[in-house]
Image (spheres, grey):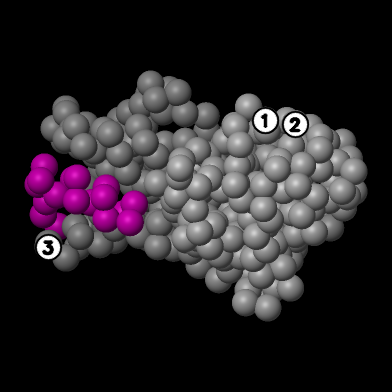
Amino acid sequence: MPSRGLVVGKFMPLHRGHQLLIESAQSYVDDLTVVVYDSDPPGVYPAMPAHTRAGWVSKLYPNLENIIVRKDILDNVPQLEKDEPKYALDYAIDLSFLGEFDYVFSSEAYGEPFAKALGAKHVVVDQAREMLPISGTEIRENIYEHRGWVDPIVYRDLVQKVVFVGTESAGKSTIAEAMATMLDTRWAHEYGRELWEEQNLTGSFHDLLKIAQNHYKREEAALLHSRDFLFCDTNPWTTLQWSLMYNKTADERLLDLVRQTKDEYIWFLCSNDFGWVNDGTRELVGQKSKDFQMQNISELAKWDINYTVLHGPVEDRKLQVIKELERQVPWWSMKVEA
């Protein structure tokens, strides 16, 4: 008979210690089930809904027998009390639908009574935190400083992307850099502009998919070194707008990339009131610029994207961005107040 093992936890966030636990269990049994408890109390750290945490487990360990999201039956009980032996049977009964297990793996004191209630053997993994001296609590207190303890797959979900879109010379680069400086984080430069300049202000339909893909790769790389937010000077959706303007169509892979990524951002549309600057690379002058801005507005509605319009000089725009971030990112607002 194949041996079955069980790991349970909140994984807020999933860190190297959790990975040691899961990997040790995988090496010990034939089939491993991981239960992710749906418990995400508000705090001064990014929201980590259960489906996101289960997604981390799935991406890192695609061969697990089962990955289960389960509502915590003691959600109203303080966390330290949940580890008391008296609650072990409650949790065991709640998971009885999963069948019998041979082993329960844990790094916590609750593991022994919980395994006993399930009729399984308890295997302790680094309970003293000697191999990996870290905890979810420590990481949540300063996620940026402790980012080395989590996999890039995890950390990129703990940083909120913010994108600035709009016509040429609308201040997208300026506000992206200004916000990154203000909040001590990174910003993603516009790859398409750099390629355009490298190719002596020439381009083709073939370039557009490459621009979108490489810009997105740039964002993903910058996420791993960002604190709370990554400010993006355009994104793949912007490349789509150029494709539609010039060609009235787009590569299906570019459309797919936009579909897959558009919900990753908080969106800002930069007004066409920033003052047009001829830096030698601009194409859209006068009515062309206005037409492209109108296309952006129309396409934002078509894609059902909620956005905030920025207007005025840089200092005014910075205040507008901060106000909207405080509204859309409650945990960050609480962190700033704290």
Residue position marked by numbered label 3 in the rendering: 200
Quadrant containing the C terminus in the rendered view: bottom right
75 lies above or below 159? above
Assess whether residue 205 is covered by the magenta stretch: yes
Residue positioned 37% across, 36% down in the render: 260
Helix, strand or loop for disc 1: helix
Instruction: Name which residue lies at 71% across and 41% down.
Output: 118
Which residue type does callout 1 highlight? Ser
The residue type indicated by label 2 comes to Ile
Residue 175 colored in magenta in the image: no
Residue receiving disc 1: 96
Asked whether 198 or 88 is in front, the reply is: 88
Residue 132 disc label? none
Amino acid marked by disc 3 = Asn
Q: Which residues are magenta?
A: 201-217
Which mark is first along the chain, 3 or 2? 2
